[in-house]
Amino acid sequence: MALRLMRSAVGCVLLVLVMALVPLGAGASVALAATPGVSAPAAKVVFLSAITFTGTATVTPDVSRVEIVVDIEGSRRSLVADVETSVRNGTAKLTWSLETPGGYLLPNTNVTARFRLAFADGSTATGPSTTVEYEDTRYAWKTVTGDFVTVHWVDGGSSFGQRAMQIGDEAVRSVSSLLGVAEQNPIDVYVYGNRQAFYDVLGPGTRENVGGEAHPEIRTLFANIGPDAVDDPWVGVVIPHELTHLVFDSAVDNAYHYPPRWLNEGIAVNLSEGYGQSDRSAVGSAVSAGTLIPLRALAAQFPTTRERFYLAYAESVASVTFLVDRYGPDAMVKLVRSYADGVSDDETFRAALGVDVAGFEAAWLDSIGAPTPSPFGPKPAPAGPVPADWGGPAPTPGTIAGDSGAPTPATSEGPVSAPGPQASGSSIPTVIAGSFALAFVIVLMIALWARRRSTLRSATLTGAVTSEEAESSQSQDELMADEDVVDSPASVDGAADR
C-alpha cells in the first residue's frame, strides 16, 4: 500500500512537471526563435573578372529563399537572383558573384547590392545595401579636374592631362551653349595610352577602328590616346566628338524614345570637325554608284564593313549640314530639344522643320542630286531543282517544266534542271506501293466489319444485346462502311506535338 502511494505520488509529481514544462517549452520556443534578417553585403572587386558579395542571414522556417538585388548605375532595371544558402543553427552564409568580363561592366560604374528574404506568404524583407565603384585597378591613375571634365590618364606628364582637360572643357562649354543645356554633373575622361588595355575595357565586340567611346549613362568617355599624340589634331576631334554625345544625351533625355543615330552622329561630326572633303567625296561616290544608304537604315546601328561604316558617318554629317544650311541653327536646336518630350521622330521633325523624316530625307537627296536609295533586304531565292518523282519528262537545261510537262523558258531567276532519272521511271513503284497499301486497308476494314457483325449476331441470339443496341450497332457499322478512312490534320498535328 505504501509502495502504491509512493508510486502515485511520484506520478503526480511527474504529471505536474510535464504540465509545467509544456507551457515553458512553448514560451522557450518563442523566446529562442530567431528574428529573420540579413546583413549588408561585403563586396570584393576583381577587375575584368567579378564582384563577389558575401554576407549572413538569420533564417526561420517561414523563409522560402534568399535573394540578392543588384542595381547598376545607368540602368533602369534591377537584377534579382537567388542566392544559394548553407544554413547552420539558423544562420546562413551568403555568397553571390556578378561576373564582369570586358565590355559587360565599364570602369567608373557604381554597383549597389542588398540581400532580401522572401517568405512563404509572398512578403519580403530587404537588408541594408552596399555600393561599390567598379574601377580599373590595373593602373595608378593621374587626375586633373577642370570646369566640366575630370581627366584620368596613366602615360605622359602633367601637360598631357592639362591639354586633354582643356580640350574637353571647351567642347562641353561650346556644345552646351549651342543646345541650351546647363551641364552640372561631372564628366570623367579616361585616357588609355595602351591600345590593348583600351580594348580590354570596351570588350571583344568593339570595332577595330574605334578610338573613343562615350557612355552617357555613366557620364564617362574612354579614349585611346598615346602620350606622344596629345598635340595631334585628331585628339582635338575625338574628345569633342565624344563629349558632344554626352551633352546631346542631356538635351534629349527621356524615358520613351531616343533620336535616330544618324542625327546624333551627324551633329557630333558637324560640331567637332565639320563636313570635310573626305566625307563629301564618300557621299558623292555613293550617289554616282547608286549605293547611298537610306537615312531610315541608319536610325539604330551603322554597317560593320569599313566602307559602309564610314559612308554612314559621311551621310550623317552631310544630312545634318544640310539641315543647318536649309533650316538654320535654331531649327536644329529646336529639333534636338523637342526629343526631351518623348515624341516620335515625325512629330519632332514636323514641329521643328515643318516636314516629317521622309520629307526631310527627300529634300536632302534632292539637294545632292541623288535618287531615293533602294534599301537592302531579303530577296526571293532562286528556284530549286524539280523533285525526281514529279510527273512529266525531265526538262532540258535552261528550262523549267510547266504544268503540261512541256518545257517552258526559264525565268530571270536562272535556269533550273531536274537532276537524276526521269520522273516517269520513278512514278511506277510509287503507284504500285500505294495500290498495295489501299488494298490492305480495304481488306482490314472488311475483316473487322465481318467480325463485328458476327459477334453482334451471336450476342443477339443469346439475349446479351437488346434489339435497340443491335440496331444502333448495325447503323454504326453501316456508317463505318460508307466512310472513307482519312487521317485528319488535327490528329496528325496532335501526334506531332506529343
Image: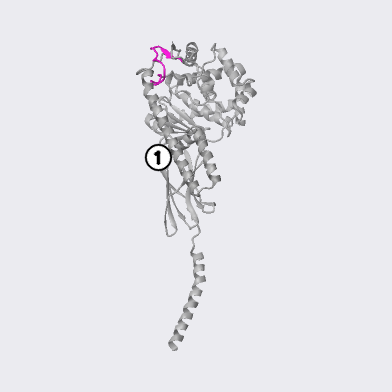
Quarter of the image that includes the C terminus:
top left
Q: Is residue 110 left or right of residue 348?
A: left
Pick the front one: 451 or 66: 451
Q: Quadrant of residue 432?
A: top left
At x 52% / y 27%, what residue is drawn? 244
Q: Residue furthest front?
A: 461
Q: Where's residue 310, x and y in %?
A: 46, 20
Decide whether residue 387 is among the magenta residues: yes
Q: Left or right of 211: which side holds 120?
A: right
Q: How is the image coloured?
A: one colour
* Secondary structure predominantly adopted by residues drawn in magenta: loop
**Residue 203 point in image, percent of width and height:** 41, 32
Residue 87 in sight: yes
* Closer to the camera in the image, 447 or 105: 447
Residue 455 x, y percent position in the rendering: 46, 44
Q: Residue furthest left?
A: 420
For this rendering, which residue is in front, 274 or 22? 22
Q: The N terminus is located in which quarter?
A: bottom left
Q: Quadrant of residue 175?
A: top right
Q: How many marks?
A: 1
Mark 1 Cα shell of 10 Å, populated few (<14), some (14-19), many (≥20): many
Residue positioned most to the bottom: 1
Which residue: 44% across, 57% down?
91
Q: Secondary structure at mark 1?
A: loop
Give the x, y percent position of residue 424. 38, 18
What residue is disc 1 on? Answer: 47
Disc 1 marks which amino acid? Phe
Magenta-highlighted residues: 385-402
